[in-house]
Image: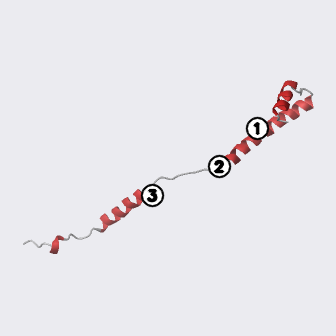
């Protein structure tokens, strides 16, 4: 003897519902994304520049204290002409 369900409706499998929810959550999750603002990039460049500047100043101090520091007149003249000073 065979008993058919009324209207051909199959019972709900809770495991399949859970899998469907997980798949949908994975589709909507997407990729992580990182954006760095222009201000943060400028700050990063400034910090690098400050480190280089501090190193250059330390070298100049050593040269002045040792008496080996010499001014390059050509570079000074170029800066004056270009308006750098």
For residue 70, above or below residue 23:
above
From the viewer's perspective, is the residue at label 3 or at label 2 nearer? 2
Numbered disc 3: secondary structure: helix
Tag shown at residue 29: 3
From the image, tell me which residue sits under label 1.
Answer: 52
Looking at the picture, does residue 56 appear above or below residue 24?
above
The 10 Å Cα crowd at callout 2, few under 14, some 14 to 19, many 20 or more, is few
Q: Which residue is mark 2?
A: 38
Q: Nearer the viewer, residue 80 or 18?
A: 80
Q: Which residue sits at x=23%, y=71%? A: 11
Eye-nearest disc, 2 or 1: 2
Asked if the residue under mark 1 is in contact with the one under mark 2, i.e. CB atoms within 8 Å, the reply is no
Q: Earlier in the sequence, mark 3 or mark 2?
A: 3
Mark toward the start of the polypeptide (2 vs 1): 2
Q: Quadrant of the C terminus?
A: top right
User: Marks 3 and 2, Cα distance to the nearest angstrom?
Assistant: 27 Å
Horizontal side of residue 48 vs 78, given as left or right = left
């Amino acid at each position: 003897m065979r008993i058919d369900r009324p209207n051909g409706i199959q019972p709900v499998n809770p495991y399949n519902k859970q899998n469907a929810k997980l798949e949908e959550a994975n589709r909507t999750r997407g990729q992580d994304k990182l954006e760095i603002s222009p201000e943060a990039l400028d700050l990063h460049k400034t910090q690098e520049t400050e480190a280089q500047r501090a190193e250059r100043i330390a070298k100049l101090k050593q040269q002045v204290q040792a008496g080996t520091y010499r001014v390059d007149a050509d570079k000074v003249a170029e800066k004056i002409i270009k308006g750098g000073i």
